Image: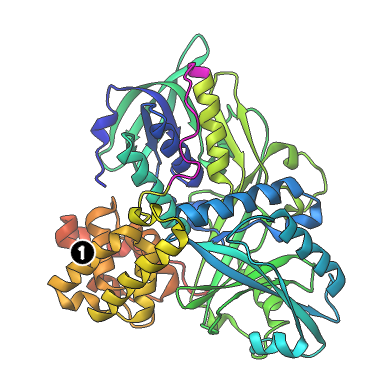
Amino acid sequence: MNRNSEQLSGQTFDLLVCGGGIYGAWTAYDAALRGLKVALIDQNDWGSATSSASSKLVHGGLRYLEQFEFGLVRKTLTEREMLMKIAPHRVWPLRFGVPVYAHSRIGLLRLKLGLMTYDFLAAGQKTAKRHRYFNSQGFSERFPFLNDQTLKGGFTYADAQTDDARLVLELVQGAIDAGAACVNYCKLTGLLENSQRATGANIRDELADKTHQIQARQIVNTSGPWIAADTRRPDDCLLTRGIHLIMPNLDLKEALLLTARSDGRVFFMIPWYGLTLLGTTDTPYHGSLDCIEVDATEIDYLLNAVNDYLCESWSRSDIIGCFAGVRVLKQEAAASSGASPSSVSRDWVLKTASNGVHYSIGGKLTSARQDAARIVDRVCEELNIDANCATLNRMLPWSPQDTEKSAAPMNGFALWSEAVHARAVQLGVDANSALWLIRRHGCKAPDILQSIEDQPALAARIVPALPLTEADLMHCAAGEMVMHLDDLLRRRLPLLILAKLTEADLRRIGDKVSAVLNWNESRIQEEIARCQVRQQAKP
């Protein structure tokens, strides 16, 4: 997975995709598989904005049933089922608990009806497990850290989880394998137009400070929140900010869907690399897109909301890391006066400007594949190309391919995963790190284990508290288009948000990867300084 901006120079592409988040990655992957000549660019790193700042969920969106968005929920539940089949390493089951207290906005009966509807919309799916009811004692035993005063009972239901940044990266790799030219740190600086129609673009390699001019028969803008700054977009759109906090380990086996007592908004407690992911908020955003800060008011909101439920309260001193992202919501919803951000639809729309450029607005991580297929359908229609969606039911690039031939792919993956896990433990990798190695790398995991067999010291964890090995670090640095240290430590491995890395930690890691990245001492110092600036300081 090598970066080469020269492959863009002087070329004519069927499709130029601007924005390398989840929507851009799925679009480029699908289009390249259909035989189109594709270029995918991002002004920063792959998935460096909203697509690495999500709640890491592949889910139907239980809360959207309150807004009667049955079509959206059905659509996302269908995608959840398919993604769990085509990428069992990347998307794995995660059950959620929902407690009901005497003060809860939604009571047991109403929640029961909602979960019955959720199960009905997922009817026939092999990966879906029906909801279960627990009385107050049973629910407390399942989640012993929750305050059980006035607890009336609760339910659990099925959804799924992913690593958002690595999902994007895997799709970019798939696009490259299918022939697409994919270049990160490459910025669109202007469009080329003929008779008021976009025919190409000027782009600048941000690393080499070199400009390229390319021709493109179709252009799609999948840059997420940056669409709001584009004066050529068809209509207005709304930006909202969401923040997440990384909190201590509560030994969560299942996630929790909770409701803030102050305003009734939903938030989550999710197990994540052995820690707890707490979020998200949803507030209007009007600030800079180059530096999206974690707002102190939103931190207080989340801590106050979760402390209403915990036996032992959390404070700011318990925060290990944090991150923020900005969503772009579709213009029909943005036009609704008086609507709170949480009530605005997460459904997706494709708009086309007068110059022919297409804009992808709104959407969700879970449904991005299906929406991207519609983008490519539109592009193929404009190009008079007859080619159907190529990603439906197609195993992802890093899925263990031999499991696909099994009569029951999920069972085949389980057997493969058990064998790889056993080998990892035999080589000295701890059990939890072995689990995450499989989730992070899929079919590439055996190659990483081979490096451990060659150099046993690579079985050690990078930092003691996190299930990430030195072999994982070196593999990402060598083969995953890492341009900066924060690419490696925020998106290839999420160390910058999961640990409080000191300057000494950054120095040690920088020294380790400098040889494969061809960094001299001066460059290492620059990269350490860059990480220190970009690492979210403890609030």
Magenta part of the chain:
382-394
| Residue 354 position in % (x across, y down) | 60, 19
Name the residue: 80% across, 53% down: 67
Residue 229 position in % (x across, y down): 57, 37
Name the side, left or right, on which 112 lies relative to 479: right
* Along the viewing direction, whichever of 22 and 387 lies nearer the viewer: 387
- Relative to 87, is 371 above or below? above
Say what amino acid the circle numbered 1 marks: Val
Side of 498 where 296 appears, left or right: right
In percent of width and height, residue 473 lies at 27, 66
Say whether residue 386 is magenta. Answer: yes
Horizontal side, residue 57 vs residue 311: left or right: left
Decide whether the magenta segment is chiefly helix, strand or loop. Answer: loop
Asked where in the image residue 25 lies, by quadrant, the reply is top left
- Secondary structure, mark 1, is helix
- For label 1, the crowd category at 10 Å Cα-Cα, with few meaning under 14, some 14 to 19 and many 20 or more, is many
Relative to 95, 102 lies left or right: right
Q: Residue at x 45, y 64 (%)?
A: 411
Residue placed most toward the observer, 461 or 407: 407
In the rendered view, how is the structure colored? rainbow
Residue 293 percent coordinates (x, y): 54, 60
Look at the image and tell me whether residue 85 can be seen: yes
Q: Choose between 512 and 535: the one closer to the eye.
A: 512
Which residue was labeled with disc 1? 513
Query: Does the magenta segment cover residue 64?
Result: no
Q: Is residue 511 visible?
A: no
